[in-house]
Image (tube, rainbow, N blue to C red):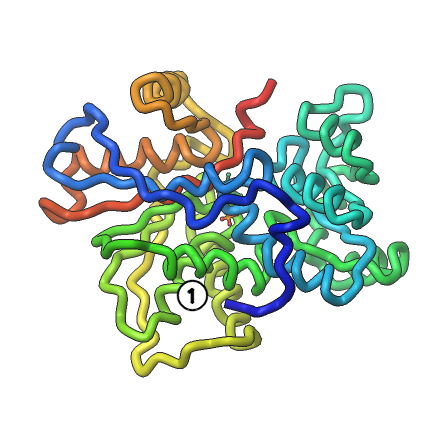
Amino acid sequence: MINTLSLTPIIQDISLPSPEQQIFPDWEYANEYQLWVKRDDLIHPIVSGNKWRKLRYTLEQAVSTGVRHIVSFGGGHSNHLHALGYACNSLNIKLTAIVRGHFHSNLTPMLQDLVAWQADVQFVDRKTYQLRDDKTYLASLAQQYPNAMFIPEGGSSEFALAGVADIISELTQRYDYLLTPVGSGGTLGGLIHGAMNQPEPLHTKIIGIAVLKGDGYLEELVGKLLSSRATLPSQVITPQPIADWHINHQFHFNGYAKASPELHQFCQTFNEALSIPIEPVYSGKLFWAVKELMAKKAFTAGSKILLLHTGGLQGARE
Ligand SMILES: Cc1ncc(COP(=O)(O)O)c(C=O)c1O
């Protein structure tokens, strides 16, 4: 954990640690396992799920170093921009949101919130957006917005790794499997970082469920993030910094934000039966994947499985 100043008095209603809740869905073979959900979706009504985890130390750094302007990137339904817009407004920091696509005449509910929270929203075409990690493009933006702090898409920076790693330290029991959705890799990277930072090996298999087509690419992203962990303060140096992890690419439903009628129906049925809100972009694909993997008996019998609910329901808003 990085020690900087605490934002919780400024961003109110942050509720930590998030609960670990056991669930009993009526899925095939579900009664042969112990299924638990880490309810990070309950951390805050807006800065929920992996958003608080990923942004926490970045924002603390921003406030403690007097940053007055943040620039970040996302789509028209971005959970990341939504959480960041709310947090920046609460912290009195200006946010410039660089948004993929032209929604001028048809703002999504997420963009309407950003505008209400005083964010400066800049639309760019897809080609320009693809340059979001390009050094030359970022240098030109840095000239345009001098003194601004830049946060990558999805908030996936090395500080995000440290924030997500706190999840591992919070766990109240040992699990055989820990599963999370994977978009930009920061959450999975943070869980791996957390596992590698324990004084003792965790003995938990960490599985990412890819929510987009990214076989190879996502592993590379996670690898890059993990190589940046060396720059983080407060590392526990473990004699065997081992984490057992992989990404499953079978449940992306043909791409980011793509879904079948069955997946929509699954989310609705799940919400009604278990009163845990899931949506088809992230959490729905995760829960679906676990249901399918159980049906294939892909987990060791009798094992304890934890699903990380990463929150974020922007994709479900019309
Ligand atoms: C709600 C939600 N869950 C999961 C993810 C995936 O996390 P990551 O981008 O860190 O892989 C995202 C995207 O950041 C998200 O918004």
The quarter of the displayed image where residue 30 is located: top left
Taking 143 as reference, is 61 left or right? left
Nearer the observer, 255 or 187: 187
Going 52% across and 65% down the picture, which residue do you hit?
A: 224
Q: Is residue 122 visible?
A: no
* Residue 286 at x, y percent in the picture: 36, 37
* Residue 229 at x, y percent in the picture: 51, 71
Which residue, given by chain and number where applicable, does mark 1 sit on? 193
Taking 172 as reference, is 2 left or right? right
Please tell me whether residue 22 is drawn above or below residue 224 in the rendered image: above
Nearer the observer, 122 or 34: 34
Taking 132 as reference, is 19 left or right? left
Going 55% across and 76% down the picture, which residue do you hit?
A: 233
Nearer the observer, 149 or 213: 149
- In the rendered image, the residue lying farthest to the front is 9
Please tell me whether residue 106 is drawn above or below residue 200 in the rendered image: above
- Indicate the amino acid at tag 1: His
Cβ at disc 1 under 8 Å from ligand 1: no
Pointer 1 local density, CA inside 10 Å: few below 14, some 14–19, many at least 20: many
* Residue 59 at x, y percent in the picture: 67, 56
Going 67% across and 41% down the picture, which residue do you hit?
A: 81
* Residue 169 at x, y percent in the picture: 38, 61
Going 60% across and 48% down the picture, which residue do you hit?
A: 154
Please tell me whether residue 44 is drawn above or below residue 106 in the rendered image: below
Taking 242 as reference, is 203 left or right? left
The quarter of the displayed image where residue 173 is located: bottom left
Quadrant for the C terminus in the image: top right
Q: Is residue 18 visible?
A: yes
